[in-house]
Amino acid sequence: MRALLRLPLPRTLTDYLGRELLRFLLMVQGLGAFTLITLGVMISKFGVARRLIHPRVREETARAGLRLLPMFLFMSAALGLLVIGQAVSWLTRVGAIDYLGTIMVVVVVRELGPLATALLVLARIGTANVIELGTARATGEVEALEALGIDPVHYLIVPRVIGMALSVFALTVYLILGALLSGYLWAFVQDVPLRPEEYVRQLAGALSGLDFVLLVLKTLAFGCVIALVTCYHGLAQPLRLEEVSEATVTAVAQSIILCVLIDALFIIIYLTT
């Protein structure tokens, strides 16, 4: 696949489309095989080297979750202002302020909260995964682990997948709760005639058990996809140091596309249930 990127530009549109299709198929094949290998290692080595892997999982969870919490608190306040600031001005014009809680659930809980969290984690931690693993692969650190009898997938990839999945879920919950709270505060500042108990009643009426189930599944899927794609581009292919930046850009682009496709799939589930 790296050889395809270094080929000269094709002369015709047909050649270009053919090359891009081949690159896409090779990427799907490689990423699928990498995912299966990671899943196989997680199952076959479950409980192996707990004293080594469990601290790694906690470290990755803290890096992708706890250390990003201050930024997400700010983003939750901004998201509440963004949604409420636009919604209140329009709902008051048509006398439909009773739908404020429903809008917050549909926009923040179902869509913006999980997707915004995934993209922020990708920007802060996903890129770091590609750079760290790509540099380790280029400098021979991965081969050194193998020489010591340490499985690089078990030591480097599995903690990142678990840690990022848990972090995206936890940060999404914090972002949603902060946005719902800040949304009401911004509505209060704008003198919206909505009591707190009425706002909570609207939120509870708009939420369902399916929302909680799909929220968990969606956030875990986002975290796993981001971790697998970024780790795949950093570790699964031989890189030179000068190719790490290019691999990072590719991993970010593919992660965004896959997250949007997953989000679209969950939208279809919402609409058909």
Image (spheres, rainbow, N blue to C red):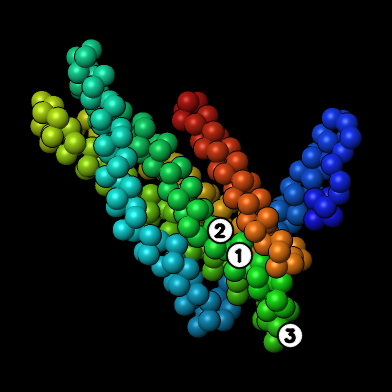
Of the image marks 3 and 1, the number of the one nearer the N terminus: 1
Q: Which residue lies furthest to the bottom in this view?
A: 148
Instruction: Count up the numbered dots.
Output: 3
Residue 205 visible in the snapshot: no
Above or below, comparing residue 118 to residue 21 in the picture: below
Residue at (52%, 49%) from the top-left corner? Answer: 222
Occupied quadrant, residue 49: bottom right
Return the x and y of residue 59 as percentages of the image width and height: 45, 72
- 2 left or right of 148? right
Residue 97's disc is none
Above or below, comparing residue 69 to residue 155 in the picture: above
Residue 131's disc is 1
* Element type at mark 3: helix
Q: Do the residues labelled 3 and 1 touch (CB within 8 Å)?
A: no
Q: Which amino acid does label 1 sit on?
A: Ile
Residue nearer the viewer, 15 or 30: 15
Return the x and y of residue 227 as percentages of the image width and height: 57, 58
Q: What residue type is labelled 3?
A: Ala
Q: Residue furthest top?
A: 94
CA–CA distance in space, label 1 to label 2 = 6 Å
Q: Mark 2 points at which residue?
A: 127
Residue at (86%, 49%) from the top-left corner? Answer: 7
Residue 147's disc is 3
Residue at (23%, 37%) from the top-left corner? Answer: 183
- 95 left or right of 18? left
Of the image marks 2 and 3, the number of the one nearer the N terminus: 2
Q: What residue type is labelled 2?
A: Thr
Above or below, comparing residue 128 to residue 171 in the picture: below
Above or below, comparing residue 47 to residue 256 in the picture: below
* Element type at mark 2: helix
CA–CA distance in space, label 3 to label 1 = 22 Å
Q: Are marks 1 and 2 in contact (CB under 8 Å)?
A: yes
